Every structure is written in C-alpha cells, then in structure tokens.
Image (cartoon, grey):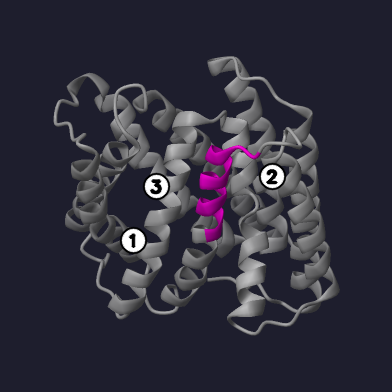
C-alpha cells in the first residue's frame, strides 16, 4: 500500500508538471504572437526542440530517437501539424480560457473517431460524453444565438485533429520511446511550418529580443509530453487524468490576471458540461472495461 501511495503521489506531481508546462506554453505563444505569426512561432518550437533533443542524445548515450513506424509518424504528424497550427493561431486571437475550453473537447472527437472508424462500441458512458460534450461545445461556440465565432471553429478543428493524432500516438508508443516520438514530431513538422511562413510572407531570423519566450516555448513543449508520459507510467489514469481539469481554472486566472480577459457564462457552463462528460467516461471505462492502459 505504501508503494502504491508513493506511485500515486509521484504520478500526481508529474501531472501537475504537465499542467504547469501547458499553461506556460500558452503564455509563451501569446507573448510571441505580438511579434511573430503562428507559423513562425511553430518554426521556433520545432527547431529548438530538435536542438534540445540532440543535446540530450549526446549527453545520454542510452537514449534513442530511432523509429520502427516511419509511416505512422508521418500520418500522426500530419494531423498534429493541423492541430498545433490551429491551436497556436487560436491563442493569438482568442482569450486563453476559450482556447483551452475548446481544446478539452478532444475526447469527444476521439470517441466519435473510435466509433466510426475503428468500430469501437458505443457504451452508455460514451453516450453521456457525446451528449454533454457536444452540448457544452455548442454553448461555447455560439455565445450569440445568431452568430458562430469563426476563430472558435478553427480551434475546434485543432481538437478534432489532435483526436486523430492521439490515436496514432498510442500506436507509436508500442515500439517507439517518448523522445523518439517528440524528435520525429519536430523534424517532420518543421518543413510544413517553414512553407507556411513562406506562403504568408512572414519568416523572421531576428529572435534575440524574444529568445527567453522562444526557449520557454520549446522547453515547456517537450516538458508537457514528458510529464504526461511519466504521470501515466507512475500512476493509474483514473487518478492522474482528472487532475488535468485543474488546467481550466488556472488558465482562466492567468488570462484574467495577465491579459485582462473576461470570463463569460457560456465558457463556464460549456466547460463544466465537457469536463463532466469526460470525467464520467474516464472513470467508467477504466473501472469496467480497462480501455486506458499504462504505456
């Protein structure tokens, strides 16, 4: 029992690290958005992530960035690039609370994808997730009954794309280590972001004034994935995944304190419905069906 408690404590601390990294990522992107486009910001993230991973590889000879699933890496990162681009753009034009709230719809789309494409069974708990989640999403997207915020739709696209990407991430973890997945993620997406920067005519090399936020973005991007993996490795998903819901109130406070962002009733009500549906599904599926397993 003592060993279980220690592992759960370790998993909880790693999950808090995940939340910390994601929040700092949001702040870094927002600060960089005042001077760079979303594609330029992704260029910085990809380049510096590659450099950091290569340094880790040189310092630790026991690590590896080899992959046995190059095709799945390309498929995964095609969808992840769409998700990352939409999410990054959203942070530059929308309140942080809105972006993070819509991002939390990802389990809804992952469930729909699993049912429609992978022929997963529609359980009662998943039905609850779909009903509550889609209702909450509609409330967030349509603050005015006569108008849908187009920028919110772009962020919603990121949640759908992330849902596809996460399905392939799960496949990749069967043969590749976390560091390898992160390396190929940055390497494959870098040409896409450079092309995007060239198309819109914005590509900058003068980064000395903003190097702190660029490095913070790269470090927290890697840190978020590593912390989440270690959280799931050390503790049960039923314990650590619900902790991620703390990210919503934290980012609400950050948006209000740093950027004077207001919090609407639509965001609060919609987020509560999404979180409730997701929480019920996670608890039910882990308890009765064991759908989420340790990596």
Secondary structure beneath dot 1 equals helix
> Relative to 272, is 276 above or below?
below
Query: For residue 97, what is the image quadrant?
Result: top right
Which residue is disc 2 drawn over?
Answer: 245
x, y percent for residue 199? 21, 44
Secondary structure beneath dot 2 equals helix
**Residue plotted at (65% across, 50% down):** 9
Magenta residues, dominant SS class: helix
Question: Along the horizontal axis of the image, is 244 left or right of 187?
Answer: right
Question: Sequence order check: which comes first, mark 3 or mark 1?
Answer: 3
Taking the view exactly as shown, the residue that stands out farthest to the front is 146
Which residue is disc 3 drawn over?
Answer: 85
x, y percent for residue 221? 40, 45
Which residue is disc 1 drawn over?
Answer: 179
Give the Cα separation between the discs numbered 3 and 1: 21 Å
Question: Along the horizontal axis of the image, is 230 left or right of 222?
Answer: right
Question: Along the horizontal axis of the image, is 240 left or right of 60?
Answer: right
> Relative to 34, is 76 above or below?
below
x, y percent for residue 295? 52, 71
> Relative to 92, is 45 above or below?
below
Tell me if mark 2 has few (under 14), some (14-19) or many (20+) residues whose alpha carbon lies within 10 angstroms of its own: some
**Residue plotted at (77% across, 78% down):** 122
x, y percent for residue 82? 41, 55
Q: 57 or 135, which is in the foreground? A: 135
Question: Sequence order check: which comes first, mark 1 or mark 2?
Answer: 1
Give the Cα separation between the discs numbered 1 and 2: 25 Å
Question: Sequence order check: which comes first, mark 3 or mark 2?
Answer: 3
Front position among marks 1 and 2? 2
* Res 112 seen here: yes
Q: Give the range drawn in magenta.
A: 148-160
**Residue plotted at (63% across, 63% down):** 109
């Amino acid at each position: 029992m003592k060993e279980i408690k220690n592992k759960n404590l370790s998993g909880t601390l790693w999950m808090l690290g995940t939340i910390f990294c994601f929040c700092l990522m949001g702040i870094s992107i927002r600060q960089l958005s005042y001077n760079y486009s979303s594609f330029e910001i992704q260029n910085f993230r990809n380049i510096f992530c590659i450099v950091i991973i290569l340094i880790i590889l040189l310092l630790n000879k026991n690590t590896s960035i080899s992959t046995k699933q190059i095709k799945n890496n390309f498929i995964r990162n095609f969808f992840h690039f769409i998700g990352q681009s939409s999410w990054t753009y959203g942070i530059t034009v929308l309140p942080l609370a809105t972006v993070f709230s819509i991002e939390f719809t990802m389990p809804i789309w992952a469930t729909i994808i699993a049912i429609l494409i992978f022929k997963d069974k529609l359980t009662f708990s998943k039905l609850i997730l779909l009903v509550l989640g889609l209702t909450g999403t509609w409330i967030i997207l349509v603050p005015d009954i006569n108008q849908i915020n187009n920028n919110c739709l772009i962020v919603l696209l990121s949640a759908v794309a992330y849902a596809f990407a996460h399905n392939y991430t799960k496949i990749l973890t069967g043969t590749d280590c976390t560091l390898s997945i992160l390396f190929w993620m940055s390497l494959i997406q870098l040409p896409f972001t450079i092309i995007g920067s060239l198309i819109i005519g914005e590509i900058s090399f003068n980064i000395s004034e903003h190097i702190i936020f660029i490095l913070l973005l790269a470090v927290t991007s890697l840190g978020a994935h590593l912390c989440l993996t270690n959280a799931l490795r050390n503790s049960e998903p039923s314990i650590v995944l619900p902790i991620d819901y703390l990210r919503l109130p934290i980012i609400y406070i950050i948006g209000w304190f740093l950027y004077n962002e207001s919090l609407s009733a639509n965001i609060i009500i919609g987020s509560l419905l999404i979180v409730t549906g997701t929480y019920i599904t996670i608890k039910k599926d882990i308890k009765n069906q064991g759908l989420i397993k340790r990596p």
